[in-house]
């Protein structure tokens, strides 16, 4: 579909992994990743983004290719320093976002099976050998049956909660229909307190699920709300 549309509109088409690519070179100790990007005309090294996850490398690649295509079409020069500065300032609230250091607390709005798969992949890659505490809350119309099992496998502790102030929030009964062995605390402040009371500074707490839940907890920690 995309290829056909590009041909019909006589638009240039660049495919990630074919016409351009980016790859991770190292994980930064200050939270982030360093990458290298290349296409037919450019090779940019030691680029840094303050975001975690393999998918963020690919997101950066697409953004870079788009920007470089624009510069080429407008016959403008490539300013490497501007590109590096822009990437370093990239933010994505609620997407594997660190909000506390000790213990390490991460917010991630993974609210569908695909998002959960990427989250689990990132957790396993970044935090091998560390205890992972997970707090999860979703809407009831999401595919809980595909999201709860991978979360349960990666977590040393998994606690379910209810998305606040939303009539579509998954109920304890809906969670129990998928897995009745997972602990449930409907009140998210109580759930958060329970986990924090039993966590060490070496553990990792990942709070994930609906953006409604992530927004509420982010506001609790940072006083900022995520727009849906």
Image (spheres, grey):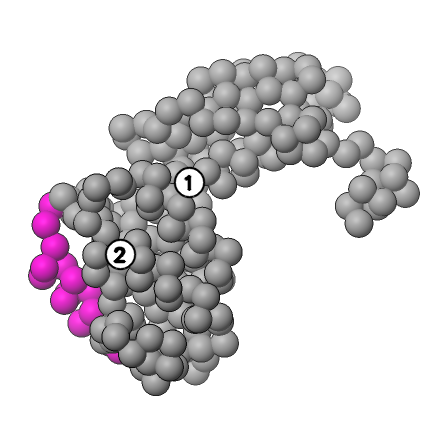
Q: Tell me the crowding category of disc 2: few under 14, some 14 to 19, or many 20 or more residues within 10 angstroms, Cα based.
A: many
The extreme bottom residue here reads: 173
Regarding residue 197, the answer to whether it shows in the image is yes
With 185 as the anchor, is 6 left or right in this view?
Answer: right
In this rendered view, identify the residue nearer to me: 7 or 130: 130
Inspect the magenta stretch and tell me whether residue 200 lies in it: yes
Q: Tell me the crowding category of disc 1: few under 14, some 14 to 19, or many 20 or more residues within 10 angstroms, Cα based.
A: many
Place of residue 199 in the rendered image (x, y in percent of width and height, measured from the top left): 12, 55
Regarding residue 222, the answer to whether it shows in the image is no
Place of residue 78 in the rendered image (x, y in percent of width and height, measured from the top left): 62, 16
Q: Of the residues tagged 2 and 1, which is closer to the observer?
A: 2
The number of numbered discs placed on residues in the rendered structure image is 2
Q: Is residue 25 above or below residue 168?
A: above
At 21% from the left and 61% from the top, the residue drawn is 157
**Mark 2 highlights which residue?**
155
**Mark 1 highlights which residue?**
53
At 43% from the left and 82% from the top, the residue drawn is 167
In this rendered view, identify the residue nearer to me: 210 or 83: 210
- Helix, strand or loop for disc 1: loop
Q: What stretch of residues is rendered in magenta?
A: 186-201
Place of residue 170 in the rendered image (x, y in percent of width and height, measured from the top left): 39, 78
Query: Alpha carbon of mark 2 to alpha carbon of mark 1: how far?
Result: 18 Å
> Of marks 2 and 1, which one's residue comes earlier in the chain?
1
Place of residue 178 in the rendered image (x, y in percent of width and height, measured from the top left): 38, 76
Q: Quadrant of residue 197?
A: bottom left
At 33% from the left and 80% from the top, the residue drawn is 176
């Amino acid at each position: 579909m995309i290829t056909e549309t590009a041909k019909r509109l006589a638009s240039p088409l660049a495919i990630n992994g074919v016409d351009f690519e980016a790859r991770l070179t190292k994980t930064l100790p200050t939270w982030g990743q360093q990458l290298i990007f290349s296409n037919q005309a450019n090779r940019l090294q030691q680029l840094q983004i303050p975001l975690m996850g393999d998918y963020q490398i690919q997101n950066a690649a697409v953004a870079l290719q788009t920007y470089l295509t624009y510069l080429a079409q407008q016959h403008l020069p490539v300013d490497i320093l501007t590109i590096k500065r822009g990437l370093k300032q990239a933010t994505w609230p609620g997407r594997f976002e660190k909000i506390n250091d000790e213990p390490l607390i991460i917010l991630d709005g993974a609210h569908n099976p695909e998002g959960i798969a990427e989250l689990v992949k990132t957790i396993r890659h970044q935090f091998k050998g560390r205890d992972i505490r997970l707090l999860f809350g979703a809407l009831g119309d999401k595919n809980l049956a595909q999201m709860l099992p991978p979360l349960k496998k990666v977590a040393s502790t998994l606690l379910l909660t209810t998305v606040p102030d939303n009539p579509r929030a998954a109920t304890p009964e809906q969670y129990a229909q998928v897995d009745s062995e997972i602990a449930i605390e409907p009140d998210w402040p109580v759930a958060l307190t329970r986990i924090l009371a039993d966590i060490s500074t070496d553990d990792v707490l990942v709070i994930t699920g609906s953006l409604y839940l992530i927004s509420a907890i982010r506001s609790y920690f940072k006083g900022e709300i995520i727009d849906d």
